[in-house]
C-alpha cells in the first residue's frame, strides 16, 4: 500500500469512527465556566450575534474597536469566553471582524478589531492602543483569562507578536503575512504562534525562516500557506488557526477535551490532504498532514498520520517539488537584492522591461511555483517603490518621487496608491488640475478613504473647490 492509499484509507476510517462515537462534552456551549466569575449585569453588554463597528474604550474614548460577540453570549450568562484581539495594518478593525465573525460564532470566540493600530506608529503608540484594548476586554466582557489571543495582518501581525512578547496574559498569536518584530534577541515570554502566508506574498521567505527560528527557540508553533497574495487569509485558512489554538487549550487543560471536535477536524484534514496529493500538490498535502499531526498529537492516535507523512516525504516527486521551491526562494532573495541596488540606478524604461519579463514568465508554462515567485517579486518591488516614494517626498525630491511612483504603478497597475501619491505631489507643485486628475484615477481604481483625503495637508486649500468636493462625494 502506497502513501496515497494509506491516507485515503485513514480518512475513511476516521470518518467511520466519528459516525459511531460521541463527544465527551456533548452539545456544550463554547466558553469556559470559571468559579467565582462575576455574572455580567443585564443590559451592560452590546447586542450579541451582531457586528458593532465603532465602540469607544472606557478608559480612552479616542481608542475604538469593532466587536463581535457570539450569539449565545448574553447578559447574566455565567460563562467566560476566549477572545481574539485583531490588528489590521491600516486600522480597519471592522475588516477582520466582518471576515471572521462566522468563525467566532462557530467556535465561541469574542472578536475585537482595533480601529487605531496601523503601520507607521511608534512603539509607544502601539503599546498604548494594545494595553487599552486588553483593559477594555478584561473589564467589560466575560473573558476567559486563560485564553486571550491576538491576531494581525502584515504590520498588524508584527504588532500582535510584539505585544505578546511583553504581556504574559496573551497565550497565543495568529500572525498573517508577516513575522515577529524584535527577533534580534531571544524572547523571554513564549506563547503559541500560528502563522499563515500566501504563496504569492513577498513575505513568504520571511515566514518560512521564522518557522526555523521558532523551532530553535522551542516555541509551540505552526506555519501554513495558502494560494494568495499579501492579504488577510481566506476564512478556511483562518479556521485552521482557530482550531489550532483550541486544540492547544485542550492539551494544556484549559478546556475540556471535545472528541467530536477532534475527530471532525482529523477527518477534514485527512480528506483535504488526500485531495491535494491526488491533484499533484504534494507540498500542500504534506503541510496539511503536518498541521493535523501538530494539532492532535497527545489528543488522538497519530500512528497512521505519521506514517502517511513519512512516506510522502520519501516520495521522489515530493522531494523534487521541495527542491524546486527552495531553489526558487534562493533565486528570489538574489532578485530582491538586485531590485534594492538598481532601483535608483536604472531608468523607468529598464524597469518596464524587467516588470514585463516577470509577467511573461508567469504566463509561460504550468510552473505554479515560478508564477508565485514572480508575483512575489512584483509585490516586493511595489512595496519598495512605495517606501522610497514616501522617503523622497519627505526630502522634497520631486524628480525621484515621480520616478518611484511611475515604477510603482508599472509593478502594481491596479493599486490606487501611486495615483493618490501623485495627486499629493502635484498639489505640492500647485498643479491643482493634474492633482485632481490623479485623485480621480485613484478613485477609479477603488480608492475610498475619504478621511485620509480630508486630513491630507496638501488638500486643505481645496475645501471650497467644487471639483474636489465632487470627488469626495464619490468616496465612502
Image (tube, rainbow, N blue to C red):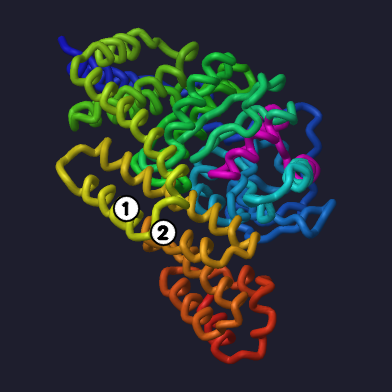
Q: Name the residue under label 2.
A: 407
Return the disc, 2 or 1, that comes first in the chain's sequence. 1
Q: In which quarter of the image is residue 200?
A: top left
At a point 39% along the width and 33% down the height, the residue shown is 334
Residue 323, percent from left and from top: 28, 21
Give the side of residue 324 with respect to residue 68, left or right.
left
Q: Does the magenta stretch include residue 31?
A: no
Report helix, strand or loop for mark 1: helix
At a point 35% along the width and 26% down the height, the residue shown is 288
Q: Does the magenta stretch include residue 139?
A: yes
At a point 41% along the width and 48% down the height, the residue shown is 379
Give the side of residue 269 with respect to residue 280, left or right.
right
Residue 355 - label: 1
Residue 123, percent from left and from top: 74, 42
* 107, 326: nearer the viewer: 326
Quadrant housing the N terminus? top left
Q: Do the residues labelled 2 and 1 touch (CB within 8 Å)?
A: yes
Q: Is residue 260 above or below residue 75?
A: above
* 60, 29: nearer the viewer: 60
Q: In this view, does 73 lie above or below 188?
A: below
Q: How far separated are the C-alphas under marks 2 and 1?
A: 9 Å
Which residue ends up furthest to the right in the rendered image?
Answer: 59
How many C-alpha atoms fall within 10 Å of the one at disc 1: few (<14), some, or many (≥20)?
some
Residue 137, percent from left and from top: 74, 43
Q: Residues in magenta?
A: 135-164
Amino acid at each position: 500500500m502506497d502513501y496515497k492509499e494509506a491516507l485515503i484509507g485513514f480518512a475513511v476510517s476516521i470518518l467511520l469512527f466519528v459516525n459511531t462515537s460521541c463527544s465527551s462534552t456533548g452539545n456544550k456551549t463554547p466558553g469556559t465556566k470559571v468559579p467565582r466569575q462575576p455574572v455580567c449585569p443585564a443590559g451592560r453588554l452590546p447586542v450579541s450575534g451582531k457586528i458593532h463597528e465603532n465602540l469607544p474604550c472606557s478608559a480612552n474614548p479616542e481608542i475604538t474597536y469593532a466587536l463581535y460577540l457570539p450569539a449565545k453570549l448574553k447578559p447574566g450568562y455565567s460563562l467566560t469566553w476566549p477572545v481574539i484581539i485583531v490588528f489590521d495594518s491600516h486600522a480597519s478593525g471592522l475588516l477582520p471582524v466582518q471576515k471572521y465573525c462566522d468563525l467566532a460564532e462557530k467556535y465561541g470566540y469574542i472578536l475585537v478589531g482595533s480601529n487605531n493600530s496601523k503601520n507607521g506608529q511608534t512603539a509607544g503608540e502601539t503599546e498604548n492602543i494594545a494595553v487599552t484594548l486588553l483593559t477594555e476586554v478584561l473589564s467589560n466582557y466575560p473573558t476567559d483569562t486563560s485564553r486571550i489571543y491576538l491576531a494581525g495582518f502584515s504590520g498588524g501581525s508584527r504588532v500582535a507578536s510584539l505585544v505578546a512578547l511583553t504581556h504574559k496574559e496573551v497565550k497565543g498569536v495568529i500572525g498573517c503575512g508577516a513575522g515577529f518584530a524584535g527577533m534580534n534577541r531571544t524572547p523571554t515570554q513564549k506563547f503559541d504562534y500560528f502563522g499563515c502566508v500566501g504563496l504569492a506574498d513577498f513575505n513568504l521567505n520571511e515566514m518560512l525562516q521564522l518557522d526555523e527560528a521558532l523551532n530553535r527557540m522551542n516555541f509551540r508553533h505552526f506555519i501554513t500557506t495558502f494560494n494568495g497574495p499579501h492579504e488577510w487569509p481566506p476564512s478556511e485558512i483562518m479556521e485552521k488557526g482557530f482550531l489550532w489554538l483550541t486544540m492547544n487549550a485542550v492539551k494544556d487543560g484549559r478546556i475540556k477535551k471535545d472528541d467530536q471536535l477532534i475527530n471532525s477536524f482529523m477527518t477534514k484534514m485527512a480528506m483535504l490532504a488526500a485531495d491535494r496529493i491526488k491533484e499533484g500538490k504534494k507540498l500542500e498535502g504534506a503541510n496539511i498532514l503536518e498541521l493535523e499531526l501538530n494539532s492532535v498529537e497527545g489528543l488522538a492516535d497519530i500512528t497512521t498520520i505519521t506514517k502517511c507523512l513519512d512516506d510522502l516525504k520519501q516520495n521522489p516527486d515530493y522531494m523534487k517539488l521541495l527542491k524546486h521551491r527552495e531553489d526558487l526562494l534562493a533565486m528570489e532573495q538574489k532578485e530582491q537584492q538586485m531590485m534594492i541596488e538598481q532601483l535608483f540606478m536604472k531608468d523607468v524604461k529598464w524597469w518596464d522591461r524587467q516588470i514585463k519579463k516577470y509577467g511573461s514568465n508567469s504566463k509561460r508554462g504550468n510552473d505554479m511555483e515560478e508564477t508565485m515567485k514572480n508575483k512575489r517579486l512584483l509585490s516586493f518591488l511595489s512595496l519598495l517603490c512605495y517606501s522610497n516614494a514616501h522617503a523622497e517626498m519627505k526630502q522634497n525630491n520631486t524628480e525621484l518621487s515621480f520616478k518611484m511612483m511611475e515604477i510603482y504603478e508599472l509593478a502594481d497597475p491596479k493599486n490606487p496608491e501611486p495615483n493618490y501619491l501623485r495627486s499629493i505631489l502635484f498639489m505640492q507643485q500647485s498643479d491643482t488640475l493634474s492633482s485632481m486628475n490623479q485623485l480621480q484615477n485613484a478613485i477609479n481604481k477603488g480608492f475610498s478613504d475619504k478621511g485620509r483625503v480630508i486630513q491630507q495637508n496638501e488638500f486643505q486649500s481645496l475645501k471650497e473647490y467644487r471639483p474636489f468636493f465632487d470627488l469626495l462625494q464619490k468616496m465612502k
